[in-house]
Amino acid sequence: MNNSALPSEVERFDLSARIQHIILFTTFLLLSFTGWGLKYAYRDPATAWISFWGGAKMAGIIHRVAGITMLLVFTYHQFYLVNAARKGGLRLTLVPMPKDIIDLVQNFMYFLGLRKEPPYFGKFTYMQKFDYWAVYWGMLIIGVSGFFLAFPVTVSPLFPSFTLPWIWDAIGAMHSDEALLAVVFILIAHFYGEHLRSDVFPMNWLWLTGKMPIDQLKHHHPAEYDYLFGEKKDK
């Protein structure tokens, strides 16, 4: 295709996807701030932090509302995917493939100077796929354990009596430790990989506009560029 005929930007995420992402990260931040404040509510300096949220009771309410909202938007996302498939607009670009393993190896070789070119990435890289599917794992662990902790009386009949001496400690540890893992991953891997890279610093506007400049697409996702503007090979 003639370069003069190419658009300056391509849409990566529609308005619905962008709104879902905004709600997801907003509730995630609220859950992180209030959750860790609640865990150490009576230990300095966390006491000052929990006071910022109006005390432990108010922080608990905010935490539960944010958690329920996150679960609702996660549920909505499944209908969003089904609707996209119904309309024929769903490509399996986020499904992990054997090529992702090859891309991983080639990427490390590129970082170590053992390869001249970066991998031939499709619409999403292996790291972005991991980023996406980690939400499903997190919803399973954090969501279910959080629901149990929020409504202990309601769910207690689900547990055999012999588990009662330790089950709530185990659920609390699952909820807390998985939350810590999620916070660390988001702050280090996701935030750096999507916003602090030199070519988008100080922020990648993709999460607001849903659009990526054509030169960035060609550089970071060459297989997707070729799919859209060259030879049609779905990646």
Image (cartoon, rainbow, N blue to C red):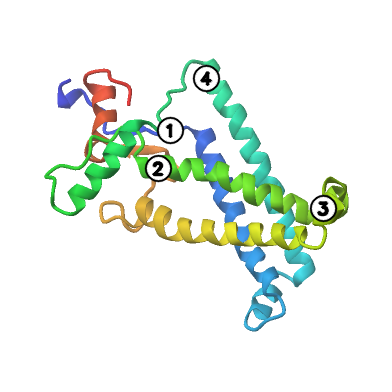
Farthest front residue in view? 162
Kind of residue sitting beneath label 2: Gln
Q: CA distance from mark 2 to mark 3?
A: 34 Å
Of pointers 2 and 4, the one earlier in the residue sequence: 4
The reply to whether callout 2 and callout 4 are in contact (CB within 8 Å) is: no
Q: CA distance from mark 3 to mark 4?
A: 35 Å
Q: Nearer the viewer, mark 1 or mark 4?
A: 1
Q: CA distance from mark 1 to mark 4?
A: 13 Å
Number of the label disc, if any, that sits on residue 128 = 2
Of pointers 3 and 4, the one earlier in the residue sequence: 4
Image point (13%, 49%), residue name: 114
Image coordinates for residue 116, horizontal then vertical, percent:
11, 45
Image coordinates for residue 190, horizontal then vertical, percent:
42, 53
Q: Quadrant of residue 112?
A: bottom left
Of pointers 2 and 3, the one earlier in the residue sequence: 2
Residue tagged by mark 1?
A: 94
The reply to whether callout 2 and callout 1 are in contact (CB within 8 Å) is: yes
The local secondary structure at tag 1 comes to loop
Number of the label disc, if any, that sits on residue 163 = none
The answer to whether residue 167 is seen in the rendering is yes
Image point (87%, 49%), residue name: 154
Q: CA distance from mark 1 to mark 3?
A: 34 Å
The local secondary structure at tag 3 comes to loop
Q: Which residue is nearer to you in this view: 215 or 70? A: 70
Residue 222 lies, with reference to residue 105, above or below; the image says above
Image coordinates for residue 178, horizontal then vertical, percent:
58, 57
Q: CA distance from mark 2 to mark 4?
A: 21 Å
- Packing grade of label 4 (10 A; few <14, some 14-19, many >=20) is few
Residue tagged by mark 4?
A: 85
Of pointers 1 and 4, the one earlier in the residue sequence: 4
- Packing grade of label 1 (10 A; few <14, some 14-19, many >=20) is some
Quadrant of the snapshot with the N terminus: top left
